[in-house]
Image (tube, rainbow, N blue to C red):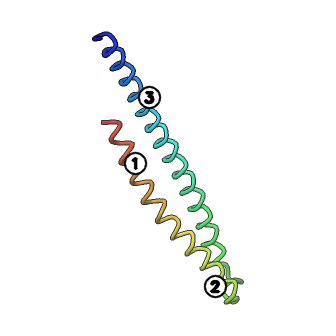
C-alpha cells in the first residue's frame, strides 16, 4: 500500500509542477502581449499627437475634436494596460523569487 501512496505522491508532484509551469507560461505570454499592445498604442498616440499639432488641423474644429477623442480613447486603454502590466510583472516576479 505504501508503494501506491508513494507513486500517487509522485504523480501529484508532477501534476503540480506542470500546473505551475503552465501558470508561468501564461503569465509570461500575457505580459508579452500586454507589452506589445502598450508599444502599439503608444506609437498610435504619438502619430495622433503629430496630427493634432499640424497647422491645418488647428483650423478644423471637427477634425481636431475627432483626433482628440481618439487620443483620449488610447490614453484610457493605456491606463488599463499599464495596470495589467504591473499586476503581471508582480506575478512574474513572485515566480522568480
Packing grade of label 1 (10 A; few <14, some 14-19, many >=20) is some
In terms of secondary structure, where does tag 3 sit?
helix
In terms of secondary structure, where does tag 2 sit?
helix
Structural distance between the alpha carbons of marks 1 and 2? 36 Å
Q: Earlier along the polypeptide chain: callout 1 or callout 2?
A: 2
| Tag 3 residue | 18
Structural distance between the alpha carbons of marks 3 and 2? 52 Å
Nearer to me, 85 or 20: 20
Q: Residue 65: which numbered mark, if any?
A: 2
Q: Residue 89: which numbered mark, if any?
A: 1
Packing grade of label 2 (10 A; few <14, some 14-19, many >=20) is some
Residue displayed at 36% across by 19% down: 8
Q: Earlier along the polypeptide chain: callout 3 or callout 2?
A: 3
Query: Is 78 drawn above or below residue 32 in the view shown?
Result: below
Q: Is residue 97 left or right of residue 57?
A: left
Residue displayed at 52% across by 42% down: 29
Query: Is 38 drawn above or below residue 66 in the view shown?
Result: above
Nearer to me, 16 or 23: 16
Amino acid at each position: 500500500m505504501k508503494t501506491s501512496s508513494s507513486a500517487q505522491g509522485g504523480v501529484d508532484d508532477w501534476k503540480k509542477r506542470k500546473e505551475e509551469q503552465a501558470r508561468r507560461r501564461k503569465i509570461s505570454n500575457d505580459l508579452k502581449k500586454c507589452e506589445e499592445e502598450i508599444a502599439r498604442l503608444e506609437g498610435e498616440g504619438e502619430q495622433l499627437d503629430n496630427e493634432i499639432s499640424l497647422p491645418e488641423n488647428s483650423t478644423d474644429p471637427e477634425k481636431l475634436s475627432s483626433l482628440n477623442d481618439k487620443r483620449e480613447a488610447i490614453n484610457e486603454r493605456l491606463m488599463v494596460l499599464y495596470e495589467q502590466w504591473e499586476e503581471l510583472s508582480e506575478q512574474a516576479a513572485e515566480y522568480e523569487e
